[in-house]
Image (spheres, rainbow, N blue to C red):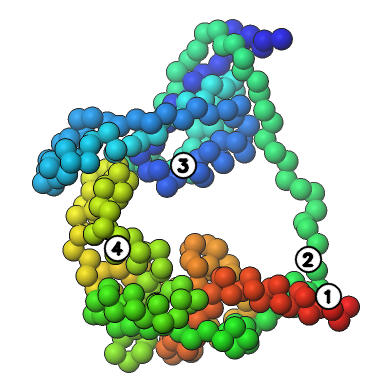
Amino acid sequence: MTNESSSQNELLVVILDDLEKLPDLLNKLYEVGVPGVTLLDSVGGRRAHSWMEDLGLGGLARLFHVNEIRQRTLLAIMPADMVDAAVAASEQAVGDFSRTGAGLLFTVPLGRVVGLCKTEAPEAPETAPVVSREDLVLRDLPVAEAAAMLHLEPVTVFADAPLSEVTRAMLRSPSAHVVAVVSETGHLVGIVTLRDLADKIFFGVMPELFFGEVHDRDQAESFVQMAATRLARDCMIDPVAVHADDPISAAFRLMHEHRLPALPVVDDENRVVGVVSLLELLALTLRMQGEETTRS
């Protein structure tokens, strides 16, 4: 039977410019019980042309087609008493919509709605999952011991190293997944991830791929700056590292929070002494759990 309602419902419309926020936005709306979301591709035509011309990118716009510059428009119909929670969830995921490059949010009162089904927000589990003895041992294992078991050597370059040198350094130790950028005294000043390095290298090979990800003026300026990337300092991000005596749990937490495939290991003076890789940690997990299972 069709669910038909003429009671108070509203349409939530979010025009999202910052597409990196999209997964979190969808999750937040689901958590507050929004019945469903429809996604549409969209683009602000006047803005797309104006800022590209201002930056001297008019030729690139015609070369790669302006319709590659995308926004996402989200449409969600919900009972009026759910709107405040949905707006709050949207702001939690996206931030202040009044800031440049965030997007636009508004609601529209509706008349008759057919097919709307209200969903309940998922309930949190009453009890936390049980952590096994083997996992507790792994969590508390010092990073230095794990690095010694994994036999990984840190990859380091100076900030003025060209990207070709950074690439060769990473190829010498592909399991490391990050390159530590160090000062002349060996202190950590930044890191270059495999993904960022590949993006900078392939920018020259496939520029149209990156141009399709440009959605506002700030990203367009980054697009222009990417063309000038030549050295490690142009590609590195702020340093994130663990100390040798930190537990593995701290290393994984940092990698999870910063979405990094690996971390440099530093001493008390912030000099690079090792590296711990997410992939190698997975191998270590299997190894240790297997050993514990054999002994038990």
Q: Measure the C-alpha gap from mark 2 to mark 4.
A: 41 Å
Earlier sequence position, callout 1 versus callout 2: 2
> Is 104 above or below relative to 222?
above
Earlier sequence position, callout 4 versus callout 3: 3
Give the x, y percent position of residue 187: 37, 86
Q: Measure the C-alpha gap from mark 1 to mark 4.
A: 44 Å
Q: Residues within 10 Å of mark 2 (few under 14, many from 20)?
A: few
Quadrant location of the C terminus? bottom right
The quarter holding residue 224 reads bottom left
Dot 3 amino acid type = Leu
Are dots 1 and 4 in contact, CB under 8 Å? no
Figure label count: 4
Residue, x 27% and y 53% (percent of image)? 206
Helix or strand or loop: what does disc 2 sit on?
A: loop
Q: Which residue is mark 4?
A: 200
Earlier sequence position, callout 1 versus callout 4: 4
Q: Residues within 10 Å of mark 3 (few under 14, many from 20)?
A: some
Residue, x 62% and y 38% (percent of image)? 31
Q: Which residue is mark 1?
A: 293
- Quick one: 79 or 53, which is closer to the camera? 53
Earlier sequence position, callout 2 versus callout 3: 3
Q: Measure the C-alpha gap from mark 3 to mark 1.
A: 41 Å
Helix or strand or loop: what does disc 3 sit on?
A: helix
Dot 2 amino acid type = Val
Is residue 219 among the parts visible in the rendering? no
Q: Which residue is mark 3?
A: 22
- Quick one: 175 or 80, which is closer to the camera? 175
Residue, x 38% and y 31% (percent of image)? 41
Earlier sequence position, callout 2 versus callout 4: 2
Dot 1 amino acid type = Thr
